[in-house]
């Protein structure tokens, strides 16, 4: 019984309705789902439609599937099963799908197969819409990277150092067995003459293919010889070890210059994550290096890489941005992790304003105050005065460092530059040597004058009024976007595996981020 004077609204769960309620009435006019619907309806999705060849049973409309995926990612729903569940329970997803309910396999296939070929085109169409509406001007491009976990087992990692060590050890064992067989086999001596068997290393490295041919020759030879049971056992031992050697060779191919890869996602490398830095023993985990370019906190470019360092990813990232090639940004701002000679040369070729920091820029702008640190700074090679006429540097003890030689220097991406070497010949009796160098001999430094020229250009731009403004803005551009995606939206691990699929997933997430940002304007 209700207390006297208390009135409750009628509550009847079985109350019949003459007409079913329209879902459109349940979705507010300014809701994010309506923004997603409105923008995607205005896009030219012909490249996406072209992926459907026809024939067989009817397919869900790709426009509907794209809307569902983008809205789900905007609402922090990344699992295909959870998206399918939302299509049955979530009013907004039911509204934008028109009441259709594709299962999680259909959603996953659309995301991982259909969108893999067209996600950049769709992203470009959204970016074109943002430019036309005046939200993005493509004047200033702020680039940065972060590590996102891969969908891989953290305990199943192949390391390059271990693979190399195991392979060389196995090659040495096989080499010793072959040498023993060679010493007791007259037929082998006649075949090789005075030459020895190929040594491990150099051009004569024993490969699985070479060993397999050698084993076949030995087997044929030993068939006709009596009393060669020991040699036959050794050949069988080599045959038993061949699969291991082939495995190591295959691992080296998959590593392709990387320090590691994951067995469960071979294109993911084991990288140190930013959130693990505070740990006492931070562990590397399978992950990808995600690079983005932003303007106004809209994502205007993205790429995904297996390499850990941002320096080697920059040019590959810029080359992936098809939409930016006809009209590149006026200026590019990046932190010191990108400031290499190769990247500066790229900016110059593309006629993009150089506002890219380098590794000593902060120290130059904020010299140390403590006497001990000031004393240490004196001995950095970058502070040594240079005499162009004599072509020599001067160390803190006022001794000259004379030119020695020029060597070519090649980066991991193949960029070739020249490094000039200078040496001081007065170090042996110098009282400042313990502070200047730990080398047993003289102090040597290497210099790239081309890199110095690029750094002077970057320094002049960075300390200008425009440069100071861009430096302030850079701190709230890509960092804010990454913070929103990783911490507010909870996206710290990819759902798909493989570089192409992972990049597809990040492309969908980028579209979702931009539409969320648009809805907040």
Image (tube, grey):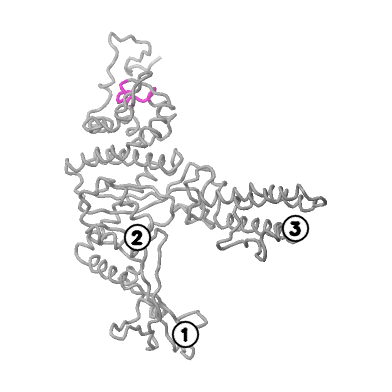
Which callout, 3 or 1, points to the residue nearer the camera? 3
Q: CA distance from mark 3 to mark 1?
A: 60 Å
Query: Would you call the spot at circle 3 few (<14 residues within 10 Å), some (14-19), or many (20 or more)?
Result: some
Quadrant assignment for the N terminus: top left
Q: Position of residue 285 (x, y in %)?
A: 50, 49
* 130 vs 1: above or below: below
Which callout, 3 or 2, points to the residue nearer the camera? 3
Q: Please report the bounds of the magenta region as a residue range.
A: 87-98
Q: Earlier in the sequence, mark 3 or mark 1?
A: 3
Q: Position of residue 273 (x, y in %)?
A: 46, 52
Left or right, 219 with reference to 340: right
Q: Which mark is residue 185?
A: 3
Residue most extreme to the right? 227
Instruction: Give the structural element (helix, strand or loop) at label 1.
Output: helix
Q: Position of residue 309 (x, y in %)?
A: 41, 57
Instruction: Provide the major secondary structure of the magenta segment.
Output: helix
Instruction: Give the structural element (helix, strand or loop) at label 3.
Output: loop
- Residue tagged 2: 338
- Residue tagged 1: 433
Q: CA distance from mark 3 to mark 2?
A: 59 Å
Task: Tell me, yes or no, if residue 222 can be seen here.
Answer: yes
Tag 3–tag 1 contact (CB < 8 Å):
no
Does the magenta-highlighted stretch encompass residue 92? yes
Task: Tell me, yes or no, if residue 31 can be seen here.
Answer: no
Tag 3–tag 2 contact (CB < 8 Å):
no
Q: Which mark is residue 249?
A: none
């Amino acid at each position: 019984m209700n207390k006297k004077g208390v009135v409750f609204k009628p509550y009847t769960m079985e109350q019949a309705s003459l007409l079913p309620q329209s879902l459109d009435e349940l979705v507010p006019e300014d809701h994010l789902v309506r923004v997603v619907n409105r923008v995607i309806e205005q896009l030219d999705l012909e490249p996406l439609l072209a992926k459907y060849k026809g024939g067989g049973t009817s397919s869900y409309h790709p426009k509907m599937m794209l809307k569902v995926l983008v809205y789900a990612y905007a609402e922090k729903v990344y699992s295909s099963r959870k998206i399918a569940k939302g299509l049955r329970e979530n009013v907004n997803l039911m509204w934008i799908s028109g009441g259709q309910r594709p299962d999680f396999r259909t959603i996953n296939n659309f995301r991982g197969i259909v969108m893999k070929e067209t996600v950049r085109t769709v992203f470009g169409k959204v970016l074109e819409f943002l430019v036309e509406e005046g939200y993005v001007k493509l004047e200033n491009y702020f680039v940065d990277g972060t590590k996102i976990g891969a969908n891989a087992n953290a305990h199943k990692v192949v390391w390059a150092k271990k693979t190399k060590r195991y392979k060389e050890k196995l090659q040495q064992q096989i080499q010793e067995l072959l040498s023993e067989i060679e010493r007791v086999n007259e037929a082998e001596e006649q075949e090789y003459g005075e030459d020895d068997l190929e040594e491990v290393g150099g051009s004569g490295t024993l490969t699985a293919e070479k060993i397999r041919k050698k084993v076949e020759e030995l087997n044929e030879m030993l068939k006709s010889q009596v009393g060669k049971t020991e040699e036959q056992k050794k050949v069988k031992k080599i045959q038993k070890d061949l699969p291991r050697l082939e495995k190591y060779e295959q691992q080296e191919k998959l590593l392709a210059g990387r320090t590691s890869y994951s067995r469960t996602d071979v294109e993911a490398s084991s990288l140190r994550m930013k959130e693990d830095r505070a740990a006492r023993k931070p562990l590397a985990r399978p992950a990808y290096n995600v690079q983005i370019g932003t303007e106004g906190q809209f994502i205007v470019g993205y790429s995904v890489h297996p390499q850990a360092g941002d320096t080697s990813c920059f040019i590959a990232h810029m080359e992936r941005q098809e939409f930016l090639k006809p009209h590149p940004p006026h200026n590019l701002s990046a932190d010191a992790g990108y400031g290499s000679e190769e990247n500066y040369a790229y900016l110059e070729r593309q006629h993009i304003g150089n506002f890219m920091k380098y590794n000593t820029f902060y120290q130059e702008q904020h010299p140390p105050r403590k006497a001990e640190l000031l004393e240490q700074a004196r001995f950095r090679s970058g502070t040594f005065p240079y005499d162009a006429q004599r072509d020599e540097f001067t160390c803190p003890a006022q001794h000259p460092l004379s030119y020695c030689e020029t060597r070519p220097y090649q980066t991991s991406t193949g960029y070739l530059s020249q490094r000039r070497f200078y040496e001081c010949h007065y170090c042996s009796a110098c009282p400042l040597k313990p502070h200047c160098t730990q080398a047993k001999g003289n102090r040597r430094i290497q210099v790239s004058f081309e890199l110095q020229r690029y750094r002077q250009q970057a320094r002049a731009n960075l300390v200008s009024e425009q440069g100071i403004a861009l430096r302030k803005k850079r701190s709230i551009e890509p960092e804010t976007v990454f913070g929103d995606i990783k911490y507010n939206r909870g996206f710290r691990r990819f759902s798909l595996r493989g570089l192409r699929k992972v990049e597809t997933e990040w492309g969908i997430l980028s579209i979702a981020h931009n539409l969320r940002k648009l809805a907040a304007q």
